[in-house]
């Protein structure tokens, strides 16, 4: 308990960052709609966020090595705050895309600093409790961020100012903490080929996880508006998705640790396709049906990343685990960068149901590829334990995997 209290400053920074960065995505969708942006331009904003996220994951460890943890954290949060405040100064979609690159860079960079700090301070004896609390704090902040949409007016300087203030407030707990700044470790090399060599199926799984997660988070508000949800209802729609994903982790982990992970991944893909159909069918059945469908969509799609990562780690040597985690994050980011721009264009061309048709097609492809890979290679006897891994930075694999090395 004393250790967790000592990490309270870091966890408070996580909550404030989630409220800020998690709120800007859906707010941008509603604001862009009010300002007359096209669906494609709105999708570009989500893609720009994940492009900035990828840059931040790669750049943050190097910046920490140059200026230290605290200064790097201050630099990244300043970038995020500037991007938020500038929204209502220049109301142009391509200018907003640049600002969203800054917000993505901010969240990836700030999380890299926080996770490097956690990695340096926890031991194997305290790792489970600390990481469990970290996941709970991160998920709780994400849930609360979705609900902010009900109280933030679209296309309002005040709304973006509130998010910027939350981003700036994240500076205070970490910079005022009495925890000593840790030594900067070496940054993991980015070796995408390592992940593909160890498990092509895991690579496909994390790409599909990026496609489904980014599509729902960044374009889901556009879908909600198209099917008649009010802004406050869109917040609950997105929160139901996050809640479903959190609830799914325990049963998904139980299944993945007791059965062939490829079979578990295939069945989750089947369930994801069914959830896409259910979500489309629920559009005209009232709020309760729409929210329940979002919950089920989160239940079926959220665990795909962690199951895929666990399958990849089954084939890895201990010395490869950190670089493997970074490579999987790279492929996740690729899927997340492409998906919002593509799905928003599909909605413009074919209507809101096209969002879930595309996600269903992606999971259908994963299903077919998984069946093919099962015919190509027998399962391994070596099994790494399932770990619910947040998609936050290239360093996250180090703090969640060290106890297994």
Image (cartoon, grey):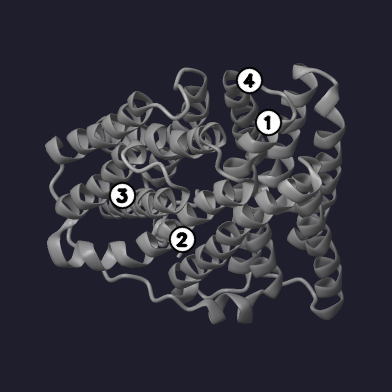
- Whichever of callouts 1 and 3 sits on the residue coming sooner in the sequence is 3
Residue identified by numbered label 4: 230
Furthest-front residue in this view:
36
Q: Residue at x 66, y 64 (%)?
A: 311
Q: Hey, which quadrant is residue 158 in on the image?
A: top left
Residue identified by numbered label 1: 224
**Is residue 34 something one can see in this rendering?**
yes
The label number, if any, that marks residue 26 in the structure image = none
* Disc 4/disc 1 C-alpha distance (Å): 8 Å
Which quadrant is the N terminus positioned in? top left
Residue 200 percent location from the top left of the image: 68, 74
Residue identified by numbered label 3: 110
Label 1: few (<14), some (14–19) or many (≥20) C-alpha neighbours in 10 Å: many
Residue identified by numbered label 2: 51
- Whichever of callouts 1 and 2 sits on the residue coming sooner in the sequence is 2
Q: Residue at x 81, y 57 (%)?
A: 361
* Disc 3/disc 2 C-alpha distance (Å): 15 Å
Q: Nearer the viewer, mark 3 or mark 4?
A: 4
Q: Secondary structure at mark 4?
A: loop
Residue 277 appears left or right of 216? right
Q: Hey, which quadrant is residue 368 in on the image?
A: bottom right
In depth, the one of 203 and 28 nearer the eye is 28
Q: Residue at x 37, y 50 (%)?
A: 99
């Amino acid at each position: 308990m004393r250790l967790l209290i000592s990490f309270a400053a870091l966890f408070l920074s996580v909550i404030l960052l989630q409220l800020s960065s998690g709120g800007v995505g859906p707010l941008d969708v509603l604001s862009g709609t009010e300002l007359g942006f096209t669906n494609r331009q709105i999708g570009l904003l989500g893609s720009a966020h994940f492009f900035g996220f990828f840059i931040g994951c790669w750049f943050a460890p190097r910046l920490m090595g140059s200026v230290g943890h605290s200064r790097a954290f201050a630099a990244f949060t300043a970038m995020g705050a500037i991007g938020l405040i500038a929204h209502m100064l220049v109301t142009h979609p391509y200018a907003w895309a640049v600002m969203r690159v800054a917000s993505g860079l901010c969240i990836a960079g700030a999380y890299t600093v926080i996770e490097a700090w956690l990695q340096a301070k926890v031991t194997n004896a305290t790792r489970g409790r600390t990481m469990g609390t970290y996941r709970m704090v991160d998920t709780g902040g994400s849930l609360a961020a979705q609900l902010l949409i009900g109280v933030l007016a679209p296309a309002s300087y005040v709304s973006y100012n509130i998010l910027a203030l939350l981003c700036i407030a994240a500076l205070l707990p970490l910079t005022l903490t009495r925890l000593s700044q840790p030594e900067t470790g070496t940054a993991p090399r980015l070796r995408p080929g390592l992940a593909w060599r160890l498990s092509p199926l895991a690579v496909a799984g994390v790409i599909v996880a990026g496609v489904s997660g980014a599509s729902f988070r960044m374009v889901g508000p556009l879908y909600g508006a198209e099917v008649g949800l009010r802004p406050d209802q869109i917040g609950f729609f997105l929160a139901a998705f996050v809640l479903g994903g959190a609830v799914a982790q325990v049963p998904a982990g139980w299944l993945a640790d007791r059965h062939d992970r490829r079979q578990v991944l295939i069945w989750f893909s089947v369930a994801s396709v069914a959830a896409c159909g259910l979500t489309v069918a629920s559009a005209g059945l009232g709020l309760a049906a729409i929210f329940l469908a979002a919950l089920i969509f989160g239940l079926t799609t959220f665990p795909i990343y962690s199951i895929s990562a666990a399958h990849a780690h089954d084939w890895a040597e201990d010395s490869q685990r950190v670089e493997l985690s970074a490579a999987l994050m790279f492929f996740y980011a690729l899927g997340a960068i492409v998906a919002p721009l593509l799905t928003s264009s599909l909605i413009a061309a074919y209507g809101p149901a096209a969002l879930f048709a595309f996600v269903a097609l992606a999971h259908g492809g994963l299903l077919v590829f998984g069946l093919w890979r099962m015919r190509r290679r027998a399962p391994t006897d070596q099994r790494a334990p399932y770990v619910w891994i947040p998609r936050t930075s290239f360093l996250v694999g180090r703090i969640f995997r060290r106890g297994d090395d």
